[in-house]
Image: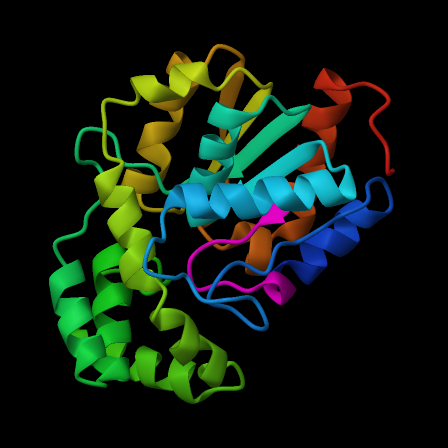
Amino acid sequence: MVIPGNNRRAHHYEALARELSGTYGVHVIERRGRGLSGPQGPAYSVETEVDDALAVMDHTGARLVFGHSYGGLVALHLGLRRRVSALMAYEPGVSIDGSFPARWLPSFNRLLAEGRHAAAMATFLKATRLAPIGDAPAPVFHALAFLLLRGAEGRDARAMMATTPAEIGEIIRLDSDGTRYANVDSPALLLGGDRSPGYLTGVLARLAHVMPDARHEIVAGLDHNAPDLNAPGVIAEQIRTFVESRVPGEQSH
């Protein structure tokens, strides 16, 4: 079961699913606020997402879980409620001792409420450092935001922006010293890329130290969008290798 990240839909993981489908049955969740799935709702929380993911697991019989970014945070909290055969996350949206930067969120919310989607997207891209353009001048981020919102997936991108405040809000609400994740006892693989921002990769070693059966790896040449855009084959191989080493004989079902 694949749990998508913030501003991502199920179809963004089609290449990853194809790479894995020769070995496993793959189910990619269309998370709340996306496509035909229902809205986040007023009582939204990470636990709401975990409820949805557990329902998919119960329906499909899935025993392996992979989460990307915010989906990785959901995967970790799923692991707090259920032991799975293998739990894998790529740069999960975890904040430890204030590590996740979120001072930009009030400005983002205000711009979004004013209908200034391009300005809000530019704020998000510049503050999170997820765009592969480094510390470019603000007009460059505005131009990139304009292209993203006017491109082939612009309509989806605009719709998903409405889910960002609640999701980033959950990351901040759940900020801690990380010790809660000591209760995740599933065999776990925590992945990151060496081209990703440090606030995403820096928590991996701390999580792996706290979690009783976890290891972490920083993969050379990868950035935050490796699972969905830039290197799904590499991520699929990491998943297969880990599962084969920890859950021998696990195949499609």
Task: Describe residue 27's horizontal placement relative to residue 128 as left or right.
Answer: right
- Within the image, what quadrant is residue 177 found in? top left
Residue at 77 percent of width and 37 percent of height? 61
Residue 26 point in image, percent of width and height: 75, 48
Image quarter in which the N terminus is found:
top right
Q: Position of residue 230 (x, y in %)?
A: 57, 58
Residue placed at 33% from the left, 79% from the top? 144
Looking at the rendered image, the quarter that the C terminus falls into is top right
User: Is residue 226 found inside the magenta-colored segment of the image?
Assistant: no
**Res 132 → quadrant:** bottom left
Q: Residue at x 29, y 44 (%)?
A: 171
Horizontal and vertical percent position of residue 178: 30, 23
In the rendered structure, the answer to whether residue 131 lies left or right of residue 192 reads left
Q: Which residue does the image show at 39% across and 79% down from the upper left?
A: 158
Task: Return the residue found at the far bottom.
Answer: 150
Q: 142 or 185: which is nearer to us?
A: 185
Q: From the viewer's side, name the closer residue of 59 and 228.
A: 59
Is residue 194 something one can see in this rendering? no
Q: Which residues are magenta?
A: 1-12
